[in-house]
Image: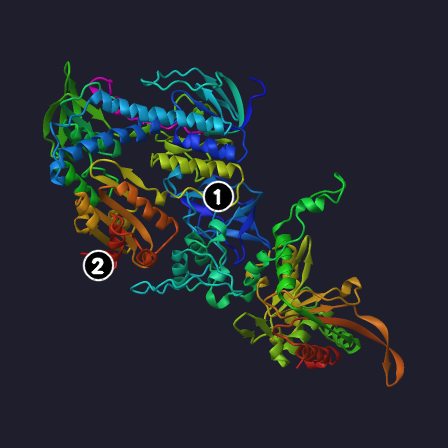
Amino acid sequence: MAGTSYDVIIVGSGPGGYVTAIRAAQLGLKTAIVEREHLGGICLNWGCIPTKALLRSAEILDHANHAKSYGLTLEGKMTADVKDVVARSRGVSARLNGGVGYLMKKNKIDVIWGEAKLTKPGEIVVVKSSKPAVQPQNPVPKGVLGEGTYAAKHIIVATGARPRALPGIEPDGKLIWTYFEAMKPDVMPKSMVVMGSGAIGIEFASFYVSMGVDVTVVELMSQVMPVEDEEISKIARKALEKRGMKIITEAKVSKVDKAANSITAHVETKDGKVQQITADRLISAVGVQGNIENLGLEALGVKTDRGCVVIDGYGNTNVPGVYAIGDVSGPPMLAHKAEHEGVVCIEKIAGLPNVHAMDKSKIPGCTYCNPQVASVGLTEAKAKAEGRDIRVGRYSFNANGKAIALGEDNGMIKTIFDKKTGELIGAHMVGAEVTELIQGFVVAMNLETTEEELMHTIFPHPTLSEMMKESVLDAYGKVLNA
Amino acid sequence: MPINITMPALSPTMEEGNLAKWLVKEGDTVSAGDVIAEIETDKATMEVEAVDEGKVGKIVVPEGTNGVKVNELIAVLLEDGEDASAIGSAPAAPAAPESASAPAAEAPVAAAPASAAPAGPAPKAADGNRIFSSPLARRLAQQGGLELTAISGSGPHGRIVKRDVEAAIASGTGKAAAAPAADAPKAAASAMPSGPSSDQVLKLFEDGSYDLVPHDGMRKTIAKRLQESKQTIPHFYVSVDCELDALLALRAQLNGAAPKDGDGKPVYKLSVNDMTIKALALALRDVPDANVSWTDENMVKHKHADVGVAVSIPGGLITPIIRSAELKPLSVISNEMKDMGARAKAKKLKPEEYQGGTTAVSNMGMMGVKDFSAVVNPPHATILAVGAGEKRPVVKDDALAIATVMTVTLSTDHRCVDGALGAELLAAFKGYIQNPMSMLV
């Protein structure tokens, strides 16, 4: 296709890719984006967003089941209609998927439909996708460009990641699920084994527990949500177990036997003992891996490491003109990391002044199980491992007025300061709505506040956020309401 | 863990530099102290040494790259046993300001109080403008004994953030006591109306009737500092004629008597300029109230006369400094000048050799200039512009006579050196020039 030449082509329209495209267009660059399946990528079609919709249904059901404790009587029994719960979740995705299409059009970004291959520096060839689309698929947007050869000065690989599979326990879409199937059950299983307790595993486990499913979580590490602070993880585990979730840590699923409509997982604990758990379904949530295949990266000599493209702080690969951002360029594999990485990358390409390399020390993480978990910065263990002299503050939900009024008095906010400088180096939370609270500390960290400014900040009463201040005060022995 | 090598800050005012040359290539093994690169700053070309040992895993910024910001990643060093695939695991941010060191990086004197002291209110620049800085940066600067006025900010809108203070600590810049008043006008200058825009200027000329040469670091520094000087320093000028005949005779006598070294070369060869430096230094010793620098709070009264000497070099000029010139014999001054003049032309001066000073000499006599006035270069309070020594008619004992005469003009910062004081300094200078034997005792 002669004449189709861009300043920048972005391969993949997930949250990293489409945000980068918009920023590129804002900077006056002629921009195109390639997508083979769904605008918005996994995040808003099969990840972050639709799971939040499912978990909202679960939350309302949980509240209803506790109506009595709020002095409310529900006539009859509240039940979940699985088809309607899934349909609502798909509707939420469809709305946002359409929204991305609108944003591309509004910013005059060409959408090229198909699968891209980097053929030589500055050129991609787009062919029909070799991957069958996950169903139900949102409609292909109108006015997209098709197969052909496209040239661009800069090519940004933003192809994301997909579920990792363990050998012998490969997902089959029927009995062994990945998040794709777990997000759209036809009928509610009665029992389930969830392999892996990272954000994805524990969120599905929490959802299905709310839906009345008998859920057993198997985690290889010694705690659920292994990246989180140990103390926070313990509180979360206790609360999840209280809700009926079974959790086995320091254990692995060594083998899965399949029957007609059930599986039997062989769960091997650290002491070598094996127990067999039979359940209707197994969710494999043992992490994700970068989509680096069939892109022509090998032929161009783009360096990869453990399934991810190797980049510097600005998204540069070792090959000039080829960049990578988001999940495909390495952990943490989070949508907001991808967005920021993309913006840094494109602003650097555009030659803006004062573009700073990605700082991975201040990326927050949120998990939407019940109770929620949120964190930013170093855990207590990591801070100590770095040899830091620290101060730790803690504040429990059971001493906060708003938490008690909400009937959500289980949880904790923990803060970690560098003892010498007063720098806030970590914040960790478990409890109601903490995913909306963490950002206060993320802003504080980015503005480089010390404990002093946080102590001088007035937090509104009555709110859950007051616990953030109390936690800071506690780190310096000045806690008021405890 | 791979070690990030970042663009070092080689002087307090350095914000960016040009990566002139790599002396290593990917795969080379380096040990601490090896020179790995040459960085061209606004004033000089400097060598960067490795502070860790390892293998050069990746050169991120190729040589010949201009305008590399301080703290930007320039290369990655791999430790023993690591291969290039580990590069991605190095902290991508400018997290390792210590991995490349400026010459003679000072270790910060950490106060380490048991409980961190309050960072205090946001400081103000000497001109009263607020310096934007993060609370953490203020506390780190305070604990490291650094003055924020001497640190340039890399955060949004020039805000000083943690990495800037860490870089300053690593490079030994911004020590509170050493912070020159010169940095104060920075904020004020930026608030001043600037001249016409590039477009406005270029519109006045026909397309193709000119070439555009981008400014290098030195040109930008000259423009910035001299503009600051003229905008913030109230200049006044005092001129005087000095008869040189006695000085020239003494110079010939001293040079004639210079001992020879092993190769049969004289061990010194004094110039008129060397003697001018010495005369100015002695005059400042005699009139110490004129040997000062201005800050908004204090008169900085110097105990020695450190005389900067403007040296013209291709593309600009630089001012190496003869420290404590009032104490040095002429032969020492002469040889120091020869050495620094040569290294100035090769852009090999170290920052400490051209930063600071209490006065300066600018000599255009060799170009036949009769007289001119120079721009004060802060933190100096004075600068002496020296014209050519030429035979002129003079009146001696009510009769016309011929003498070799040189006109000098002293430019003075009126904030700290008043008119009479300037005249007194110049009279003392003239005394030494016309009675040169007094310089020898």
Judging from the image, mark 2 belongs to the subunit labelled: A
Judging from the image, mark 1 belongs to the subunit labelled: A
- Give amino acid for label 1: Val
Q: Position of residue B222 (x, y in %)?
A: 64, 57
Q: Position of residue B127 (x, y in %)?
A: 54, 65
Q: Quadrant of residue B166?
A: bottom left
Q: Name the residue under label 2.
A: A480
What kind of element bears circle 2? loop
**Horizontal relation, residue B99 to residue A64: left or right:** right
- Give amino acid for label 2: Leu
Q: Residue furthest right?
A: B399
Quadrant (top left/top right/bottom left/bottom right) for the C terminus of chain B: bottom right
Residue visible at 41% across and 49% down in the picture: B96
Instruction: Specify whether residue B281 is painted magenta.
Output: no
**Horizontal relation, residue A466 to residue B381: left or right:** left
| The residue stretch that appears in magenta | A157-182
Q: Name the residue under label 1.
A: A355
